């Protein structure tokens, strides 16, 4: 059962993503940004181990980036998002021949609504960079224990809660090392252990800041363990030091030793 406070948080979150949908869709396009293409997508696909014919639930699907990609690999994919505008962009980007895809406007914090898909109706579930945008994740995790077939897995990517949250800052320091000017990159962490709710930006030019739900690892994974999942895959991803395309003074592409993204695989025993 959702509480009044979850309803309020959901309301603000949905409004923000509806307002930001066109900017998000323009940035992600059909193929995603560098975060998606270089960090999130390859690792998600590797952990998912998709087989043609697999039925997959894509939670917080946005403009359908992952939904379409998994369908192109032969999976039947159901994309859900509670922002109607996002689903409208997802539908617009989906071609008539992409018949393995269906979309639903659906709130992932609503356990009963999720259960409409039926017990054991998915081989796997995926959520790409969306759990940190969700007011609650326990209802989703509980629902997935019923929706997934025995042995099924849930692969999710999030902003790495240790290094990439609204409580971290990117730092660049220039030092004279014996006549050579060296720039060192680091991350300053001002808070971590306490779960928090703050407003922030996913894209610099998004018109409306949205809510971030920071969960330290013990809370994020603890919710999954309490629902009955075990963790059987974990990757922490940073850009390769060879990747120099980005000319901005401070960008994640400069931090080859600090991972902005975490991808995990949960499994039902
Ligand atoms: C950062 S976007 C990621 C979109 C997409 N997965 C991608 O990788 O491009 C986060 C998405 O999560 C959705 N979202 C947030 N809370 C949700 C909820 N409770 N139920 C369904 N979708 C939700 C937002 O509407 C938004 O589209």
Image (cartoon, rainbow, N blue to C red):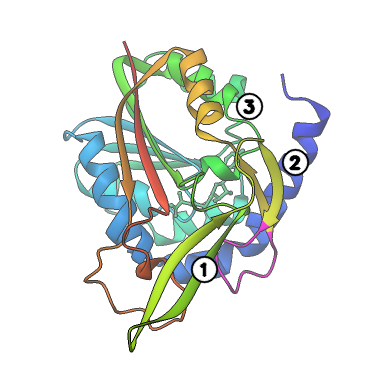
Q: Which residue position is annotated with label 3?
A: 110
Q: Cβ of disc 3 within 8 Å of ligand 1?
A: yes
Main SS of the magenta segment? loop
Q: Which mark is residue 171?
A: 1
> Residue 130 versus residue 246: which sits nearer the camera?
246
Residue 229 falls within the magenta-colored stretch: no
Depth check, front residue: 260 or 200:
260
Q: Residues within 10 Å of mark 3 (few under 14, many from 20)?
A: some
Residue at mark 3 to residue at mark 2: CA–CA distance: 13 Å
Residue sitting at x 77%, y 35%: 7
- Looking at the image, which residue is at 66% across and 59% down? 200
Quarter-wise, where is residue 230 in the image?
top left
Distance from label 2 to label 1 (Cα)? 31 Å
Query: Which of the two discs, 3 and 2, labels the residue nearer the N terminus?
Result: 2
Q: Is residue 178 visible?
A: yes
Q: Residue 184 vs residue 139: left or right?
A: left
Does residue 46 lie above or below 89 as drawn? above
User: Which element is circle 3 on?
Assistant: loop
Examine the rendered structure and indicate whether residue 247 appears above or below residue 134.
Answer: below
| Rendering coords of residue 62 (x, y %) | 49, 52
Label 1, label 3: how far apart the Cα atoms are: 39 Å
> Which residue has dot 2 on it?
9
**Disc nearest the viewer among 3 and 2:** 2
Secondary structure under tag 2 reads helix
Upstream in sequence: badge 2 or badge 1: 2
- Residue 125, image x, y percentages: 37, 31
Relative to residue 189, is residue 13 drawn left or right? Answer: right
> The C terminus appears in which quarter of the rendering?
top left
Q: Return the disc, 1 or 3, that comes first in the chain's sequence.
A: 3
Residue 116 position in % (x across, y down): 53, 21
Answer whether residue 202 is magenta in the image: yes
Magenta part of the protein: which range?
Answer: 200-209
């Amino acid at each position: 059962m959702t509480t009044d406070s979850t309803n309020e948080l959901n309301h603000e979150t949905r409004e923000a993503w509806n307002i930001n949908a066109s900017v998000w869709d323009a940035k992600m396009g059909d193929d995603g940004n560098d975060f998606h293409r270089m960090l999130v997508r390859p690792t998600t696909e590797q952990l998912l181990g998709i087989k043609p014919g697999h039925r997959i639930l894509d939670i917080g699907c946005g403009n359908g980036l992952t939904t379409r990609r998994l369908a192109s690999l032969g999976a039947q994919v159901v994309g859900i998002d509670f922002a109607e505008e996002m689903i409208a962009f997802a539908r617009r980007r989906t071609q008539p021949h992409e018949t393995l895809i269906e979309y639903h406007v659906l709130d992932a914090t609503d356990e009963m609504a999720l259960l409409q898909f039926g017990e054991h109706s998915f081989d796997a579930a995926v959520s790409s960079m969306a759990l940190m945008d969700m007011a609650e994740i326990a209802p989703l995790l509980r629902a997935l224990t019923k929706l997934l077939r025995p042995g099924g897995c849930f692969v999710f990517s999030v902003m790495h809660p240790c290094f990439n949250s609204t409580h971290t800052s990117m730092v660049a320091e220039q030092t004279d090392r014996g006549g050579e000017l060296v720039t060192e990159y680091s991350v300053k962490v001002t808070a971590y252990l306490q779960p928090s709710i703050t407003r922030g930006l996913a894209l610099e030019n998004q018109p409306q800041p949205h809510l971030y739900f920071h969960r330290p690892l013990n809370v994020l994974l603890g919710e999954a363990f309490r629902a009955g999942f075990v963790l059987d895959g974990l990757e922490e991803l940073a850009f390769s030091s060879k990747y120099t395309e980005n000319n901005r003074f401070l960008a994640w592409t400069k931090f080859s030793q600090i991972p902005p993204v975490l991808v995990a695989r949960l499994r039902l025993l």
